[in-house]
Image (cartoon, rainbow, N blue to C red):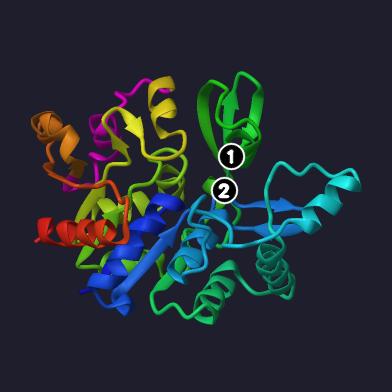
Amino acid sequence: MATVVLSGGVGAARFLTGLVEVMDPRDITVISNTGDDSEFYGLYVCPDIDTVIYTLAGMVNPKTGWGLVGDSFRALTELEALGCEAWFQLGDRDLATHIWRTMLLRQGRTLSQVTQQLAQTRGLRLTILPMSDHPVQTVLETEAGRLPFQEYMVKHRFQVAVSNICFEGSDKALPAPGVLEAIADAEQIIIAPSNPYVSIGTILSVPGIRKALENAPGKVAAISPIVGGNAVKGPAARLLCELGRPVSPLGVAQLYHSFVDLMIVDEADSALLPHIKALGMEAASAQTMMTSPQAKVTLAKQVLELMK
């Protein structure tokens, strides 16, 4: 069954770990956020794409959910000694991915082509598509000024108030080859438990993608990244509050209501189901906390069952 997953980083990667266990990975197409992409030390870094690939390849650092397990940081230490800022943690083995990607991009390959080759090289059988081959940068307007997402997230640890989010370059961007076709051909589309503003929202900022989801013949389901009033990981709860939405699955549903058919919330938030249904979508609860390999598989099974 052709399945599309809209993906951010850690939460989406964990969900995909379960999904590839319960269905044929060759039937899965991931559309990945690239608004977090940045250049560090002259290298092109794709945090969300790399997190998904490292996780599915069994290479990710399980303590952080990003980076490579057992990596060292000697190159970063030397860069800092040379006067470079070192707040963005790039490990020595991780640097190889970014060197290789940058080299191929400079040779004229597209980000789609490089991503496909990287996924295949790491032994993955699913398809991973960047949302666009054109640069789109998520920039947050904050009390500390305009900050690219990685500076907001990592350097400032998302502890500065946000008044607006901009997706610079999105107006000139096109969906990457295969993105719209995958959505149109999918029998089911899953919005992974990712930040609705700076992961999924960035994907939706690319012209044509939101409309494709609204017109998709397949069922669209979204998994809430908010559980019990808190984000499972990252700044989603803070952004919902600062941008005037309920810090709950209801706030996420309000952002998605134009294209989502089914909202899946954690069992802890089941009291919100009638309020979500009032937005004109189906709603159901499941155990969404992916605290173990079995929990990831169980959630994937539950999501597929609820989408029938």
Residue depicted at x 58% and y 32%: 157
First in sequence, mark 1 or 2: give its number: 2
Residue 198 image point, x, y percent: 47, 41
Residue 243 image point, x, y percent: 42, 23
Residue 59 magenta-highlighted: no
From which residue to which does the magenta span run? Answer: 243-263
Residue depicted at x 44% and y 28%: 239
Total residue callouts? 2
Of 245 and 296, nearer the camera is 296
Residue 279 image-quadrant placement:
top left
Callout 1 secondary element: helix
Q: Amino acid at mark 1?
A: Phe
Residue depicted at x 25% and y 63%: 297
Residue located beneath label 2 in the image: 36
Instruction: Relative to 277, say whether 161 is above or below.
Output: above
Q: Disc number at residue 149?
A: 1
The N terminus: image quadrant: bottom left
The answer, for residue 279, to whether it is visible in the render is: no
Residue 134 image-quadrant placement:
bottom right
Residue depicted at x 41% and y 34%: 236
